Image: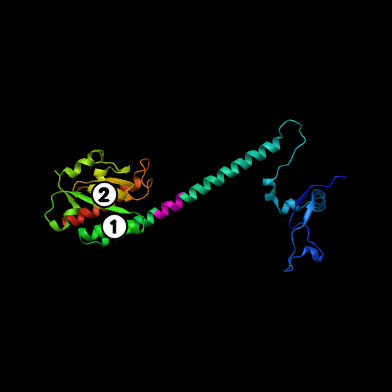
Amino acid sequence: MNEQPSVTAPNLTLPSDAEGMSETGAAMPAELTSSQVADYLRKHPEFFHEHLSLLEHMSIPHPTGSAVSLISKQLELFRSRHHDMENQLTALIEIARDNDTSHNRMHKLTLALLDATTLEEAVANLDAVLSEYFLIDFVAVRIIQYNPNPAISNLFIEPDSKDLEPFASELASNKPKCGRPTIAQARVLFGELAFEVKSCAIIPLAFTELDGILAIGSRQEGRFHYSMGNLFLNQMSEIIGTRLITLLQQR
């Protein structure tokens, strides 16, 4: 008589002799044949009442010949729907977590800008917050207006300056642009660090009381991609622009 194929069935039987025990005295999983498993289930018909979830992962044949069992088809559909719902729930949880993270970061940014009492402090706080909480490698702010204070000349670009020419497209569209900056753009914004910037978001600051450019850059190639949404970037520009306007009016 052919030997039945062996299957591993932990927790169905426990060894009673010393050979079935580990050195620590714990019971070792028994190797059972399919006949022994069938005999166990025959003696314990309530087994699947206590372990109903196992049925979801089992393939149970139905005596329908070549036809597809309706029960089997329904179970397949239920399983598929169950997995789809699990995936949707996981995606929603991830979105909720991302939204919480973004909200907390924007809160930190707002507090840091409110804490600044001068333009210099605002730029310094902005750089610190974006670096620590947003993991941004490079930050640049350029206000488009004539600057009467030479001490902070690197914060301003005069309206007729040739340095604005590389940003003509962004300023005309008044929309953020993500991707790799041109060499001319990177030099105006980041100076000697221009060649380290692999991706960048260039955000126009267009307000009644203020025109300017906000740029955030990264050493990662795909950190700021052209397909990124603009909602987060627009909100950031509104917070920063509003605070800069207040500080400019106090000068």
Badge 2 is on which residue?
Answer: 214
Between marks 2 and 1, how big is the CA–CA gap? 11 Å
Taking the spot 19% from the left edge, 50% from the top edge, the residue there is 143
Say which label, 2 or 1, has the lower sequence index: 1
- Find numbered disc 2 in the image and state the secondary structure of the residue it sits on: strand
**What amino acid type is highlighted by mark number 2?**
Leu
Question: Can you see residue 241?
Answer: no
The secondary structure making up most of the magenta span is helix
Res. 136 image quadrant: bottom left
- Mark 2 nearby-residue class (10 Å; few <14, some 14–19, many ≥20): many
Q: Is residue 97 magenta?
A: yes
Percent from the top left, x then y, of residue 113?
A: 27, 58
- Examine the rendered structure and indicate whether residue 213 appears above or below residue 113: above
Percent from the top left, x then y, of residue 160?
A: 13, 43
Q: Which residues are magenta?
A: 95-101
Give the colour scheme of this rendering: rainbow
Badge 1 is on which residue?
Answer: 127
Q: Residue furthest top?
A: 66
- Quick one: 186 or 58, which is closer to the camera? 186
Taking the spot 27% from the left edge, 49% from the top edge, the residue there is 194
Q: Is residue 66 magenta?
A: no
Percent from the top left, x then y, of residue 38?
A: 80, 49
- Please identify the quadrant where the N terminus is shown: top right
- Examine the rendered structure and indicate whether residue 27 appears above or below residue 249: below
- Mark 1 nearby-residue class (10 Å; few <14, some 14–19, many ≥20): many
- Examine the rendered structure and indicate whether residue 107 appears above or below residue 72: below
